[in-house]
Amino acid sequence: MMKHFSKNKALVVTLAFLMGTGAAAAQTTMKIANVAPASHPSGIVLQEIADALNARDDINLDVQVFNDGVLGSEMETLDQINSGVLEGQVAQGISIFQPYSPQFGVEELPFLFPTREAAYAAVDGEFGQLIAAKAEEHGFKILAFWENGFRHFTNSKRAIVVPSDMSGLRFRTAESQIRLAMFASLGASAVALPFTELYAALQQGVVDGQENPLALISKASLANVQKYLSTSGHIWNAAPIVVSKVWWDGLDQPTQSAVQTAFDEAKMRERQLIAQGDEQLVEELKAAGMEVNEVDKQAFQTATETVWARSEETIGADLMALARQIRGGKTQ
C-alpha cells in the first residue's frame, strides 16, 4: 500500500513539473524593433512598456526591445514581421507600407499637416482609421500612432532658406517615391538609404544632407557630420506601432487588452517627449556647432505643389480629398 502511494505521489510530482514546464513554454514573446536609439523618446517609452507588461502576473508575456536598428533596417524588420520572425516594430512613418500599396505614401505629401495638433487629430481620427484598416488588409495591425515628428533639412554645404538653395545638393531620404519627387521639385537630388546607413553616408560624403525630426538628428549625433540645420517642417511622420496581425489574432483576450491599453496610454507620453524635446533641441544643436535658420515655408509649399498634383493617381481621389481637407484644417 505504501509502495503504491509512493508511486502515485511521484506521478503527481512529475505531472506538476510537466504542467509547470508547459506553462513556462506557453509564455508569449513580443520582440519589438526600433531603428531609433534607446535614448530617443520612442526607445525610452518602449522600455517603460516592456518593464510594465513583463511585471504583470495576470498575463504571460515577455516583451523584448531591440533599439538602434540592431535587427535591421525598417524594411528588413517589416519583412521579418510579415514572415513571422519578429512580432512588431516602431515604424518611422506610415510610408513604410508603400511597398504594399502606394496609397500609404499620403503621409509624405509636403506640408500636409499645418500643425502638430492637426497631425494628432488626423491620425487619431478618420485618417488614422483608414490607414489602420488598409494595413490590416496586408497582414499588419497598428496598435497606436506615436510620433516621429516634423522633418527638417540638414546639410554640410550651406544654409537653406529658399528652394533654390537646394540646387545641386544630394540628400539621403527614406524609400518613398513621394519624398524623392519632393526633392526633385526643389532642384535637389536624393538617394534612398536605410536610416542605419545614414551616419556613414554623411561622414563619407556620399550625400551632403538629410532630413529628419530634431530628436533623431540629436540622438543620432548628426551634428558631428552636418553644419547647417534649416527648420522646414516639410513632412510630419507618425510612428505607428506595427505588429503581425497573425500574431495578434493568436493572443488571448486578456493579453490583447493589456498590450493595446499599454501602447494607447503611452502614446501621449511619447508625443509629449517629442514635443518638449523640439523646444530644447534647437538650442542643444546650436551648442553642438550647428548653424540654425528658418526657411521660407510659403516658397517651399509653392515649389512642392506639383508633388500633390502628380500623386492623385497613385494615392487615389478619395484619400487625396481627405488630405486636402487636413491641409486646410477642415477635418480630423
Image: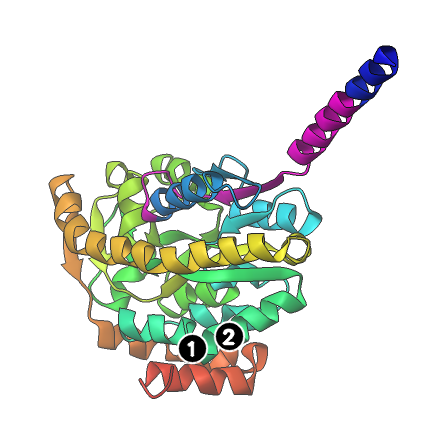
Choose top left, top right, bottom left or bottom right for residue 267: bottom left
Residue 27: say if magenta. Answer: yes
The residue at the point 15 percent across, 58 percent down is 293
Local crowd size for mark 2, using a 10 Å CA cut-off: few (<14), some (14–19), many (≥20): some
Q: Could you say where residue 300 lies in the image, as x and y percent from the top left? A: 28, 72
Dot 2 lies on which element?
helix
Q: Is residue 111 visible?
A: no
The magenta segment is 12-41
Provide the residue designation for mark 2: 129
Give the residue type that dot 1 points to: Gly
* Residue 300 falls left or right of residue 82: left
Q: Is 124 left, or right, of 71 in this rendering?
A: left
Instruction: Name the residue at 25% across, 75% down.
Output: 299
For the point 68% across and 38% down, the residue is 26
Choose between 96 and 330: the one closer to the eye. 330
Foreground pick, 45 / 306: 45
Helix, strand, or loop for circle 1?
loop
